[in-house]
Amino acid sequence: MLKRLADRSCGDCTACCEFIPIRSPELDKPSNTLCPHCLRGRGCTVYEVRPQPCRGWYCGWFFLADLGSEWHPSSSGVVLRPEAIENDAMTVVILRRSAFLLSEAFAGAIGAWVAAGVTVSFERVGPAGHLPAKTEMNGLLAPAIQQRSLPELHKAFSWAIAHIDNHHRWEPDGLTLRTTLAETTNNSFQSRSVTPFAGQS
Ligand code: SF4
Ligand code: SF4
């Protein structure tokens, strides 16, 4: 079982309250749509009564001690899905094209995972209300990793992101924004994360 690291916190990040879709009795929220109960950069305004899918999910940065603060989603623009980490799979959600994607920290970790036999996938968030798109990267990255070439690795990252963005046919997630939750009154905002509904991984 993944163990959450004590020194990690969401800080001003509210990424997963935006990009992940939620389906629950109290709240339906489409993909890539800011939750109506989230204040960007501050957190959840219904924390005490947040729906079940919002409880207990943390992105991969909370579990991987080898990843430094540069991986924090706020600054990196990258979120690691935690769902399959224990099964030797790593889904890297690229929220935006940040300088971090060109860093040695990013290339080093991706290269090490691929070399260790972890299945690495890149995921891109689709337009609001549409499911994300995911592509497996191992085959594409193998030659660059063999050559130990950082420029070739960067070229492969860039190609994969552009390929998804330009060629993927985004599918609607079928969700319509709906909430029965009332704002809590104590004004104690907290960054919180959410669990994807069944079918998202
Ligand atoms: S759990 Fe969600 S809000 Fe917290 S750092 Fe990760 S992506 Fe950001
Ligand atoms: S934790 Fe859940 S209810 Fe609260 S802002 Fe995030 S998505 Fe919305």
Image: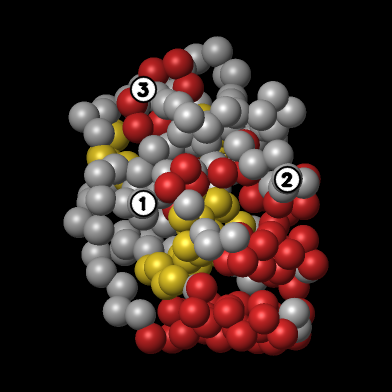
Left or right: residue 187 compared with residue 30: right
Instruction: Give the CA distance from mark 2 to mark 1.
Output: 23 Å
Name the residue tied to disc 2: 66
Q: Residues within 10 Å of mark 1 (few under 14, many from 20)?
A: few
Q: Residue 189: name its quadrant.
A: top right
Q: Secondary structure at mark 3?
A: loop
Q: Are marks 3 and 2 in contact (CB under 8 Å)?
A: no
* Residue 161 coordinates in the image, percent (x, y): 53, 78
Q: Residues within 10 Å of mark 2 (few under 14, many from 20)?
A: few
* Residue 34 coordinates in the image, percent (x, y): 45, 48
Q: Secondary structure at mark 2?
A: loop
Three-letter amino acid code of the residue under disc 2: Asp
Name the residue tied to disc 1: 201
Number of numbered discs: 3
Instruction: Give the CA distance from mark 3 to mark 1.
Output: 29 Å
Q: Mark 3 or mark 1: which is in front?
A: 1
N-term mark: 3 or 1? 3
Left or right: residue 178 compared with residue 140: left
Three-letter amino acid code of the residue under disc 1: Ser
